Image (cartoon, rainbow, N blue to C red):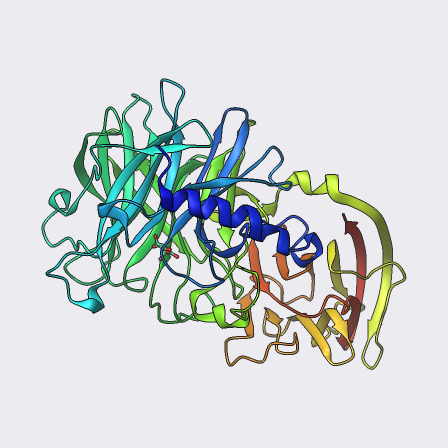
Amino acid sequence: MISQALRDARRYEEIYEKEILPEQRPLFHLTPRCGWMNDPNGFSFYNGTYHLFYQYYPYASEWRSMHWGHAVSKDFLHWEYLPAALAPDQLYDYLGCFSGSAIQTEDGKHAIMYTSVRMAPEIQDEEGGIQAQCIAIGDGVDYEKYSGNPVLTEADLPEGGNRYHFRDPKIWRASDGTYICAAANCTADQTGAILLFRSSDLMHWKYWKVLVANKGRFGAMWECPDFFELDGKYALLVSPQDMQPSGFEYHNGNGTLCLIGSYDESSGTFTEEKDQAIDYGIDFYAPQTILSEDGRRIMIGWMQNWDACAIRNKSELWAGQMTVPRELSIRDGRLYQQPIRELSSLYRDTTVCKDVQVVTGDTVVLEGVRGRCIDMTIHVRPADPERVFHKFSVRFAQKDNLRTAVSFRPHEKTVKVDRKYSGSCRAIVHQRRCLVEGSGNGVITLRLILDRFSAEVFINDGRYVMSAVLFTDLAADGISFFADGEAVIDVESHRLS
Ligand code: FRU
């Protein structure tokens, strides 16, 4: 039975999506059908297609009571909207249907596990609501909330667990067929832990153990866990709140963390070996992954940061977008990301320029290299290895005083994304730097993906990635290259359409 709240949302989005012209959205990055989007949810393969749900408020471009929006794709680039999947329409979730995941059941159904939020008379306002985990079963379009919801509540938490911060279940099947759920919880020390629960039927769950406890190392509460095997290792992705900076690795506020280690499935023991940020740019949070039909581990994140949401005016018809889906691998103990290979199906005009000299005082513009939807790779090297240049920059989304830049300073071994001049008039973070190991010799590869309202920079084959949104007027489509010193570049640029 479809509730009135869900019917209303579906009717509303069908009408209001028409107000948004295709060119007012990115070309291939998913945006909400209308209104607000945050985290990706339920990224899964079902009925021959990839499903991506998202935290959604259709009625305004700001975060309010959460619904689940829904889109499907065969190639991770062309998305088709389906009707909203969940609305907050039950007593136990009327404050919102928060993030979660999805899986195909043994009997061929599509199961969603999400966080329900409810108010209770004894709650003080500032505590938010009581969070629990719920199941909804569907056919890929319509989902019915399980009559026994919620299936995991505060009663299932270990001692010291916090019922106001118990969310974002990620479910998978262990090799013996058991369903495992990893959910985030705030522990007695006021920082995060990822808890594991087990079930044989998705409806009845038992607490198992702590997968990883933050113990105050990386921010406070952790959100949105994902956990998977990759290249002989295991990776835990989480999004910590309230982080303190640490060198160039972690920045203040909401961040992202990848823990790489080994995992013993039978005892549920994860042994941490390495930690790193997932994305070093400004806008990236709450990523989820999927195993594609051909065995690739693909990640998609919310290309926005909670503290920088003010960059988008609330009067706009949509707010929030996803990153380009990224293929993951682990090499030398690090998480690498590459834009999904299907992107080459959007290549239209290709420009290749080799051995271009970029020297102090010159502005280099290359014939055919411009636009706001491009995939451009720049190999940079010094003209003379004995005299490494001080700085190399590529500017884009450029016209008159408008521009966004990616700059490389070999003497600092840093790459900086700077959107100060992107047209934003808000006092939020507009720059961020990333330390690139081994780049002191002035050799670097920058792959820049622009899709109208965003820039994603993949450095040295995806060893580091920096993402940022920009809402510069689309008429600003110039691209130019600068150096302080003498650099030489090879450029390969593809226009995307
Ligand atoms: C992360 C998050 C999740 C929560 C959702 C609510 O961005 O705070 O922890 O489920 O957003 O929209």
- Measured as percent of width and height from the top left, residue 23 is found at 71, 56
Taking depth in this image into account, of 129 and 50 the one nearest to the observer is 129
- Measured as percent of width and height from the top left, residue 199 is found at 23, 29
Q: Residue at x 24, y 62 (%)?
A: 128
- Measured as percent of width and height from the top left, residue 442 is found at 69, 66
- Measured as percent of width and height from the top left, residue 87 is found at 37, 46
Q: Is residue 286 left or right of residue 186?
A: right
Is 486 rendered above or below residue 451? below
Q: Residue at x 56, y 57 (%)?
A: 465
Q: Quadrant of residue 42?
A: top left
**The N terminus lies in which quarter of the figure?**
top left
Q: Quadrant of residue 395?
A: bottom right
Is 202 rendered above or below residue 395? above
Q: Is residue 155 left or right of residue 87?
A: left
| Residue 272 seen anywhere in this rendered image of the structure | yes
| Residue 462 seen anywhere in this rendered image of the structure | no
**Residue at the extreme right:** 367
Which quarter of the frame holds ligand 1? Answer: bottom left
Q: Residue at x 36, y 50 (%)?
A: 224
